[in-house]
Amino acid sequence: MLERPSGASAAGAISRGAQVVYDGVSKRYGAVQALAPTSLEVSAGEFFSIIGPSGSGKTTLLGVTAGFIPPSDGRILVDGRDLVGVPPFQRNLGMVFQQYSLFPHMTVAQNIGFPLRMRKVPNAEATAQIKRILDVVRLSGMAERYPAQLSGGQQQRVALARAAVYNPSLLLMDEPLSALDKNLREEMQREIKAFQQVLGATVIYVTHDQHEASAMSHRIAIMNGGHVVQVGRPRDLYDRPRNRFVASFLGEANLFDVARHAAAPGGETTIETSDGLVLRAVGTPPAGRFVICVRPEKIRITEDEGSSGNRLSGTVSDVVYSSGTAHYRVRVTPGTEINQRTVGGSARLFEIGERIRLSWSPEDAQMVATD
Amino acid sequence: MGWQAAMRVVGITRGVFVSAAFLYLILPTFVIVPLSFSSSLYLSFPPPGWSTRWYVALWNSPLYGAAFLHSILIGLPVAFLSVVLGTMLALALVRGQPWGRRGLSALAIAPFLLPQIILAIGLYSILAKFGLTASYAGVILGHTIVATPLVFITVSAALRSTDPTFEMAAMTLGATGWKAFWFVTFPMIRLGVVTGGIFAFSFSFDEIILALFLTNTRTTTLPKQLYSELRYNMSPTIAAASTAVIAFSLLMLTAATLAGRRARRRAEAAEMTS
């Protein structure tokens, strides 16, 4: 990426995304390990998200990539070239910040022109590139406005344009949508994704919003306590969480603590939960302690009194209907409530206090390690 | 007594209090103004009659003219040097976040709070060694030491209210540290820098203790000129000169206030449209 002539290619050219390899990258502050030794591979042109709660190390990983935080150890290879020790202004990557960080004393055109000016791109060429990228983000009429005169969404698009106008092959984004309201956020998610496809750049996207990450990413890395816990496609992470943290962080999960378990015929495992429920799951349990994870949408509300699969009955303790989905909380034992989701359908809504039966198949009961 | 009447009494009392405080703070400085229009040959209050002859005398006095020029020739370099040093100090202590930042910040403000007579004695003995006691360099050096904290204070405040992510953004966009400062940070802290510079100049313009030690007849500043005039004759020319100094200082103060208001207006306008 750094071999590219500074000031980027001719108008209209599409840059190729960079491959990024983290090789044992870590960061310690005294005795505190902000980032455990981390190895990751992000493919060229990939939209790669890093999610996790605050303090999980995701911002540290991004800071190390941008060059603001020197890593304690490890290498960061971008298209084979180690970035460690290279100052931020020579990394030739684009970064979009949470607060947009548009320079308030510069117009939109001056903001977008800033990286070109730093690269000593001739005026005429810079003007053409600014115009082209303004077209891409649909802000052509706004060139002479100041950032404060733009809406949040428009400011975000200017920030994107500014980070991309010099065709960096790697774009870093640090929670770029967290300042926007929900509707605008969803619109911008689509827009950023489309923008990335036009540019072809590799994107490393940090967020604490798992919906956002799922909606936009090819792959997601989930971080917790300075470690990357699991990397995978959004669906893999949801359907096959590696541990309890991933299961509960990604989407809603009903988690049952396991008291005892035994192998059952047909490759199933019988589990007795800590509050006395007996459940069945398919497969063999992982080594060590584990929990049972059942997603709310895998649970059905049934009328019949079958005996196959997992069956529980309980009392509706809460019901919320929103956007075509009914969300029930059902108390099945004095200490256990189960979340159930019924999407669409014309079934009547059950009311609080009604007795209902729940069932789910053993295939939908995941045995997830606790660690 | 009703609630509204009670509130009115509270309001009036507060008004009287604030007015009294302001009068106490400002009036003594302005007592000199009517004296400068006195027809008397001596400084006496109240003036027996009115005239502008002392302003004519002031205008025709080569000593006052020279002293005014010296004050400017000392004040401008002091303002410039204080702005450079104070801004660098503020950048280092606010953005650099070095170990022991609180202690260092206190140290940076110390020259302004420590008695200037002590600084004057110390500086005098050092400068005497290099033969600089009666030069511009000596008094500029002395004033800069005391004025730098003023710039440090205003620029630190400006820096602290500016998000460092702007600089980080500039760097990812290809700006070196110096360019990030010059194109991004500086325009955002400009008000603090300008205000600090005006404060530094005003300080130098009014300062007497260091000037007494570190200037001679060829570099006498306006306050020192006033002081020595007082010792030899009590003519109302002093009052006229003092009034001129007050007017000049008020001008600087107004400049600082206007700069601040302009920046605030712009910020408000930005808020309104966003």
Image: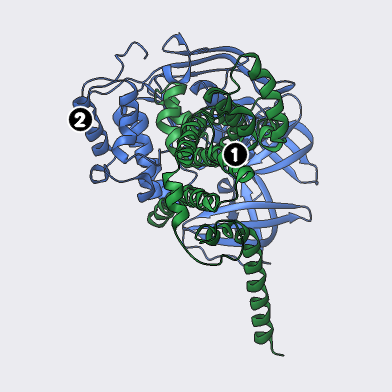
In the image, B100 versus B121, the foreground residue is B121
| Number of disc labels | 2
Name the residue tied to disc 2: A128
Up-down: is A117 above or below A247? above
Q: Chain of mark 1?
A: B
Q: Is residue B258 visible?
A: no
> Tag 1, which secondary structure?
loop
Q: What is the spatial separation of the Cα atoms under label 1 and label 2, in whole angstroms? A: 56 Å
> Tag 2, which secondary structure?
helix
The residue positioned 42% from the left and 47% from the top of the image is B59
Q: Is residue B151 visible?
A: yes
Up-down: is A147 above or below A354? above
The residue positioned 52% from the left and 12% from the top of the image is A85
Q: Position of residue A141 (x, y in %)?
A: 23, 46
Up-down: is A356 above or below A283? below
Task: Please name the color used to draw chain B.
Answer: green
Label 1 environment density (alpha carbons within 10 Å; few <14, some 14–19, many ≥20):
some
**Residue B207 marker:** 1
Quarter that holds the N terminus of chain A: top left
Q: Chain of mark 2?
A: A
As shown in the figure, which amino acid type bears the numbered disc 2? Ala
Q: Position of residue B265 (x, y in %)?
A: 42, 54
Left or right placement of residue A255 versus residue A92 in this view: right
In the image, which lettered chain appears blue? A
